[in-house]
Image (cartoon, rainbow, N blue to C red):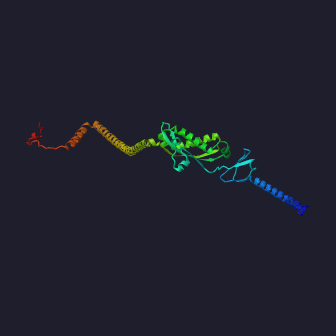
Amino acid sequence: MSENGHSDNIWADEGRGRFSVRSDMQAGLPRVRRLGRLFLLLLLAMYILSGIYVVQPDERGVVTRFGRVMADDIQPGIHYRIPWPVERVFTPQVTSIKRMSVGYRIVDRVRGVAPTAREAQFVTGDENIIEAQMLVQYVVKDASDYLFSIEEPHWLVRRACEAVLTERVAAITVDDILTTAKLEVEADVKVATQEVLDGYGAGIDIVAAHIQDVTPPREVADAFRDVASAREDRNRIIQEANGYANRVIPMARGEGQELIIAARGDSASAVSRATGDTDRFTAVLSEYQNARTVSRTRLWLETMEAVLATVRKYVVEPDGDLDLRFMETRQ
């Protein structure tokens, strides 16, 4: 003990303080352990519950385990998987219609930016250049193939459709693609693009392919308009000529039929008349052969009656003194 008697008290107080802290720590350690276990259980529950996922009505679920596809057609609803990193789930939309453009970019059109010549220009079969823009609509028909068989399927649709459209346009003339062949080209592009995507196993179904615009390049647009105007004039003249022919030909046929009917009537009348004359002559000949003198006299009288009925007649008495020289024919 020190002279003033304080040193021993200080060390005693310090010893009692250390003993008190240690006792408090030992008393609180079970509580900390309980809290730690509760925290770990909470983390484990959260990890287990993280395996719950929802597939929306317009989606299909695809579950992979360490990268291998375990289920590729999970229907809409609430489902469970082994949490990450063991299993992963992908839910692509399979019913909504997606769109991809050819010859332009949808975003650029929204912003009012014109497509570049390289995107929009195609060469026709008669070595002309046209600018064509097509919109392709498609849906996902196989979620697994769509996710894992190819890379960037959205842009694959554009490249495949662009290649097919280039091939189809190169097989026809510029006049056909600008006028009558647009629907045929759309149908061919739809079918051929689907075949290309099926060959890649893209899991995509082409719904429609529509040519939105097909025009000549701006540099020769005026010349194409002149050609189109001339073509329209030609078609108009042809239609007018066909209309005139449709009016004239029936009239000519009617007149021809009328003449044929009239000729047949005249022919029948002439034949009847000739038949009657023949029958009458035959009857007269039969009577003449039976009574020649009487028949000759009757024929002479009938002939004179017919002749004298049309001339001026003069009656002269046998003993009359009448100068008939005025009846002589003057030279």
Of residues 59 and 112, which is closer to you in this image? 112
Quarter where residue 239 is shown = top left
Horizontal side of residue 236 vs 273, given as left or right: right
Residue at figure coordinates x 50%, y 42% from the top left? 131
Residue 140, image x, y percentages: 64, 47
Horizontal side of residue 103 vs 25, given as left or right: left
Question: Which quadrant, please, contains the N terminus?
Answer: bottom right
Horizontal side of residue 297 vs 88, given as left or right: left
Of residues 50 and 103, which is closer to you in this image? 50
Q: How many marks?
A: 0
Residue 195, image x, y percentages: 61, 40
* Residue 181 seen in the figure: no
Q: Please identify the residue farthest to the right as the structure is shown.
A: 1
Horizontal side of residue 114 vs 271, given as left or right: right
* Residue 154 seen in the figure: yes
Quarter where residue 104 is shown = top right
Residue 310, image x, y percentages: 20, 44
Residue at figure coordinates x 53%, y 50% from the top left? 111
Quarter where residue 147 is shown = top right
Image height check: is 43 above or below 255?
below
Image height check: is 152 above or below 42?
above
Of residues 247 and 91, which is closer to you in this image? 91
Q: Please identify the residue farthest to the front as the structure is shown.
A: 3
Residue at figure coordinates x 76%, y 53% from the top left? 47
Residue 331, image x, y percentages: 11, 36
